[in-house]
Amino acid sequence: MNWMDASLWIWTLLLGEWLIRLIMLVVVPFRRSPAATKGWLLLIFFEPWIGLFLYLLIGRAKLMRWQRDRLALLPRVMSRVADRLHGHPNRFQPDVAPGLLQAVNLATNLGQSPILGGNHVELLAEYDGTISRLVADIDAAEHHVHFLYYIFADDHATAPVIEALGRARSRGVICRVLADAIGSRSGLRTLRPKLTAMGVFVHEMLPVSLVPWRMARLDLRNHRKIAVIDGRIGYTGSQNLVAADSKKDIVYVDLMVRVTGPVVMELQYIFAADWFLESGEVLDGEKEFPEPMVAGEVAAQVLPSGPDFPMQNNQRLFVALIHGAHKRVVLTTPYFIPDEPLLQAMQTAVLRGVEVHLFVSEQGDQPVVSLAQESYYEELLRSGVRIHLFRGGFLHAKHLSIDDSLSLIGSSNLDVRSFALNAEVMLVIYERAVTARLVVEQERYRSESRPLTIEAWSRRSFFRTVGQNLARMLSPLV
């Protein structure tokens, strides 16, 4: 055999390409949505070697075996908390309207976090004001401060938070920080030594590694935003620990919730689970999980989601709630790349006589994602969905309101990445007063938005339409 014969290499590459195509025809569809299957097979059929490399790198939406094995231990290692708080009088299931019972049951069965009564929920819509409120709570902390954020930056906006952590440590308060290894990679370079010097415990979430026994995936990210102080006060929502103007020519607009009451335990449990995954340390003491105290009258539950769950929790709940809406659905998201069930749920709701509003930014921050998102506008508009293009900054808030009785606020976008790849968290709130407060924010968005019409959208350029269609084909991979 002449290894210098060019024709031998050509035939080898050609046969290799067809072998990849045929094998991946069997492998790719396994436990994958039709849209994602089509996207991957399209890439593999056009560029077999590149497609195979990308598939091996980011194509399988599940944690590595060592991560799954560690999380499988969680119910046992956290059993002391469950045993101690089981049956506590302040940890009670409240009465909700009969029309909400199916939503409660679905969220409970998906996330294994029950609905809890006795909470107080406060919406925080002012970006710098949210940071100031967080600093005040850190300064009042007595035992611990826990942070879990996708982005934790070292900039002018987070300087007061970092200083407050230093003051807390000087009082003997335990401070633990989890920051996503990719989302916070630039901030951690300076933050980690600075915080460690203060005595703050810092771990990267899902660090990328090629070491076999600690191997981790590049594309599976922890996108949650959670803060818990003394097991009594919790924060969650869309706002990272970074300046609102951290990107050139972009100002982020976010929404957070500050909660007190028994539901804080569920936020704490998510933090404890992620801390255990990265550090192996079990947080199950009475200081981390103090006896729950009634703080208000709001019924709420936390819905975690991510590749460690057998289903796409947030997607399942969103779709079910839209199908169950009677009057009005409002969806707010920075990234809208829906799968087929979500798209159909929105269109079907309109046909049932439900008002469906979608708030997205007119200004994008990721060109390919923006083009893919825009590719859905025409069919939404033609089906009667009302699209509002926000002009008051980059609308980074992530929330839904259903009729006048239910709200969801958290970290999940309405896209395939948040549904299948990212670890996310949503707070489900069963309270008319909170929903009314959220509607006030949505009306503020409307006042700073341009309604998109099918007539105006039909006048977009031919080249932009082509770009949108090409980006849409890749949307299951974005």
Image (cartoon, helix red, strand yellow):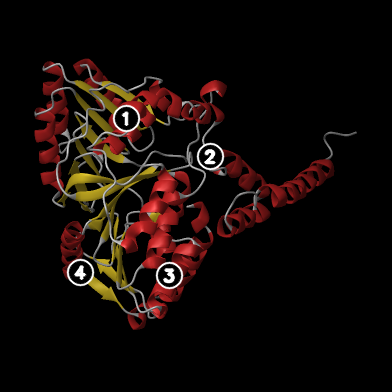
**Mark 1 and mark 4: Cα distance apart in space:** 35 Å
Residue under the point 11% across and 40% down? 133
Relative to 141, is 150 on the left or the right?
right
Q: Amino acid at mark 3?
A: Arg
The disc, 1 or 4, on the residue closer to the chain's N-terminal end is 1
The 10 Å Cα crowd at callout 1, few under 14, some 14 to 19, many 20 or more, is many
Looking at this view, name the residue that lies furthest to the right: 1
Relative to 94, is 325 on the left or the right?
right
Does the CB distance between marks 1 and 4 fall below 8 Å? no
User: Picture quarter containing residue 79?
Assistant: top left
Relative to 45, is 193 on the left or the right?
left
Residue, disc 4: 446
Q: Amino acid at mark 1?
A: Leu
Q: Which mark is residue 464?
A: 3
The disc, 2 or 4, on the residue closer to the chain's N-terminal end is 2
For the residue labelled by badge 1, is the local secondary structure a helix, a strand or a loop?
A: strand
Residue under the point 38% across and 31% down? 274
Q: Which mark is residue 178?
A: 1
Residue 177 x/y as whole percent: 28, 27
Q: Which mark is residue 62?
A: 2
The disc, 3 or 4, on the residue closer to the chain's N-terminal end is 4
Residue 209 x/y as whole percent: 49, 27
Q: In this rendering, does residue 432 appear at all? A: yes
Q: How many marks?
A: 4
